[in-house]
Image (cartoon, rainbow, N blue to C red):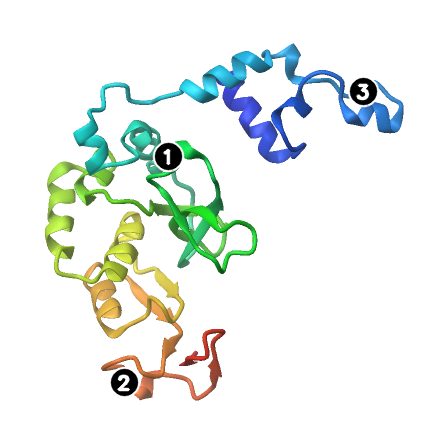
Amino acid sequence: MLRFFGIMFYMTIVDKGEYSNYWGNQAEDEIFGVTATFGLENFMTLKRFQFIRKNLCFRHKVTPEQLKKDPVGRIRPMLKYTSTKYVVLGRNVAVDESSIACRSEFGRHLIVYNSSKPTGKFHFKIYACCCATTWLMVGFLLHCASDMEDRLKGVIDKDKAKYLDDRLQFSSNIRQIVLEVTQPLHNTKRVVNTDNLYTSVTLLLSLRDVGMYGRGTIRENSALFPRRTCLRRSRTSREGLPFRA
């Protein structure tokens, strides 16, 4: 398994296109007339790699009812494990959405369509909280129909997850997303930077309640926002909606 994950990391760093390009005679040898490069057959056969990639599962006993409740239940242990890793972070973090292009039929319950994406109309949608100093992802949420208690199970204790779920059940979806992905940083007095889609008075109040600060752009029609807190510079977004920095 370590070899398999090592090959996955290698493929991320060295992009050669389809899998078959990593095994057998390498294109670099033909181009430069050298034999310095080698294929991955020295570590694992292509059929073995494809078999593991097709059948790899971190949780076998998942019922159809559980998959309806949590579509990523089979890989939830891996998501929980990676959520516990950390580094020394800076004071400023940013919350925004990201996408990973994919048209696989196996991910049909998780794939969303967005016609404005130039690199792929079908993709996985991820809400991420990233450190502005190290550029590392602190927390993330995969866009799918799942309960907060299932997503946070194993990451924080059950009572705390239940408390957070009860506290956010009457919040808007946008506020829930921001507060959940920043959960590892609650009560650290860090500054959460957001764009005008996320920023609102209620979000800033919610961040204050969990021991954090907020900063971001807002739309001019944002309700209840005190104008004295806004800079005078105004611009127009790509959608044609005016907002203030």
Q: Are marks 1 and 3 in contact (CB under 8 Å)?
A: no
Quadrant of the rendered image containing residue 23: top right
Q: Residue at x 47, y 76 (%)?
A: 237
Looking at numbered disc 3 in the image, what kind of residue is underneath it? Ala
Marks 2 and 1 sit apart, C-alpha to C-alpha, by: 39 Å
Which residue is found at the position 81% from the left and 20% from the top? 36
Crowd around label 1: few <14 · some 14–19 · many ≥20 (10 Å) = few
Q: Residues within 10 Å of mark 2 (few under 14, many from 20)?
A: few
Residue sitting at x 13%, y 55%? 169
Q: Position of residue 90 (x, y in %)?
A: 43, 54
Quadrant that contains the C terminus = bottom left
Instruction: Classify residue 58 as left or right of residue 133.
Output: left
Spatial CA span between label 2 and label 3: 64 Å
Disc 1 or disc 3, which is closer to the eye?
A: 3
Q: Is residue 93 positioned above or below 137 on the image? A: below
Q: Which residue has dot 3 on it? A: 36
Q: Which residue is mark 2?
A: 226
30 relative to 79, above or below: above
